[in-house]
Amino acid sequence: MQNQEFKPKYKEMEVYPDRELLVWEKWIEIRKEETLHLAQKTDRPPADLTMNILEKIREDKERKVVLEHAQIEKKPTVRGYLWEQPQRLKQCCYCEPVYEIQRTKEEKGLPRVIQHIGVPKYIQETEKGIIGVPERKPCVNLDHEYMQYREKREQELKEQIKKIDPFRPDIDELLVRGSKPKTPPPKIPPLPKVTLSTVITRGDEATCSIYALKINNSLFIKDIHDQKISHLRAMQNESWHESCNTWSYYFNTPISRAGRCKLYLQNPGTVMIKYCWKKIKRSLPFIPEEPLEQVFFFNKNEGSLYPGQEKELCFTFISDKPGIYNEIWELSTTNICFFDTLTEKLVINLTGDSVENIERLIRKARKLEGKINHVASRNIIMSLIDDTITKAVSIKPEAYPYKKLLLERDMFIMKNPVCFYHQTEVTNLRDLYSEMLTNETWDLSITSWRSAMVEKEYDDRMKYYELLRKSHLHLLKPWFEDDDLIQDKYRAVNILLGQLFDKFDYEYFRIRQLILNLPEGDVSETTTVSNIFLETSPMDFTIRNIFYVKMYEHLATTMETCAGILSNLDLNRWLQFDFCRW
């Protein structure tokens, strides 16, 4: 064996190139030869040939189109259609067809995103033969103003250009190699798996016509006379075997979500078994008999199981609405019956429970609760800030802005228009009110005094009623002036004016003595104020000004004193008070 020559394990196969690729490579070589020949004849590098200088024109054209589309204004629309009607050909009669101009998106004010087209630098050099360093000198001064204008407009329309031209790919740096992959062949469905096994015969056991079917963990055998199938009977005695003819599948899935399960079938016999599906109608409580739309999906076509073949049937449940659904199907064999009676059947019970997506609902509820709390907190904060600013800026009006400007007499007459003011009676009523309601002040209104009296017990109420009746009788009688009051006023004003006149001589002598520093004996007692204007002393002007200021003060004090004394004498006098003009 050592002397034997080594033979390759696999057979060597010769690979031939594609014919189209060979033609492409030949055309590339021809183009390179023509490019080099023209470059040699014209004494120019291949990049400066006329056939190659237009490679960069497309980039400038795309840039120009982007700038034009960015300047288009968006036209107003009504329900998705433009406000203005498109142009149309003249229609001589309304029955003739209408020919309207189909406007582009740019004319409608909705330009589309620009598409960039170019050739990578690798393909230009390897396939198109554009090599060498360009030696052409571009005339920059010819379009210098246009370049400045274009840059200025692009800067102004920057936001619109981003929407139309969001990116400008660098096509020159792309590297393309290889070719387009071939279309994959169509997928062929897998062939059924058939397991061939040899049946061991024992004595008189017949193996020519054995009907057997295994569904999940249940094995069904057709008992035929003179057939003794010991190995299948032994399988029925195994621990995994389940003696049942009904299989139930329960689906519990959220709405719009699929639930799947499988049914296992196997033919352990020697004869092909054909089967079909039959729907069984049974009425169940709280479950609709015929749903409006199909919710259970599986292959309901007729099928067959060859000897030794295994198959898995998939059941799918999906529903768009929450609810409980049920369908019962019979797996009926057409060429053999495994039961002695027709009442026994192979039944598949499908029950589906479509529920709401609780997690999704909880997540939405939490999100909505967070938004509500956020809005509520913001509203509360804004209301607190508004109240704070309002209280800080606004001036709170007083209950009675005129209260400080009115006397007690005016307030009493305003609240009791039919009564006259008597200071003694008003003081008496105030004391009685404080006795009725402790720690409260009377507001000078007889109505409020009467309301407080009514709330008292009967005995107290009658007592206060008598006191109020007596005081009210006095308040209804006006006070009139007599000769004594006029004489008092005259006497008081006469005394005040006499004191004012005495101040003239007093202030003059005092100011003159303080300024000129004269002794008390030098001033004559018979000098009067009229002598002030006859003297020609240099200090006469200063003395005169100080004298005027002092006399203004005495005059103001005298007028204020007169007003106060006359007001005190007029306390019990009725005066007409117009509240609206106050």
Image (cartoon, grey):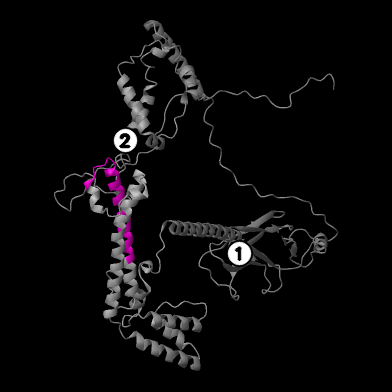
Quadrant assignment, res 31: top left
- Magenta segment main secondary structure: helix
Quadrant assignment, res 414: bottom left
Answer whether residue 402 is visible to the viewer in this image: yes
Please state which amino acid type lies under the numbered disc 1. Answer: Trp
Of mark 1 and mark 2, the one earlier in the sequence is 2
**Magenta stretch bounds:** 534-561
Residue at 37% of width from left, 47% of height from top?
519
Residue placed under numbered mark 1 in the picture: 277
Residue 117 in picture, x, y percent from top left: 42, 28
Q: Would you say residue 25 sits in the magenta stretch?
A: no
Residue 153 in picture, x, y percent from top left: 33, 30
Classify 10 Å Cα crowding around label 2: few (below 14), some (14-19), many (20 and above). some
The correct choice, above or below, for 118 with respect to 528 in the image is: above
The correct choice, above or below, for 133 with respect to 567 in the image is: above
Identify the image quadrant of the C terminus: bottom left
In this orientation, which residue lies closer to the viewer: 504 or 67? 504
Q: Is residue 122 left or right of residue 284?
A: left
Label 1 element class: strand
Residue at 74% of width from left, 57% of height from top?
268
Residue placed under numbered mark 2 in the picture: 71
Residue 26 in picture, x, y percent from top left: 47, 17
Classify 10 Å Cα crowding around label 1: few (below 14), some (14-19), many (20 and above). some
Q: CA distance from mark 1 to mark 2?
A: 67 Å
Q: Would you say residue 543 sits in the magenta stretch?
A: yes
Q: Is residue 291 left or right of residue 242?
A: left
In this orientation, which residue lies closer to the viewer: 216 or 91? 91
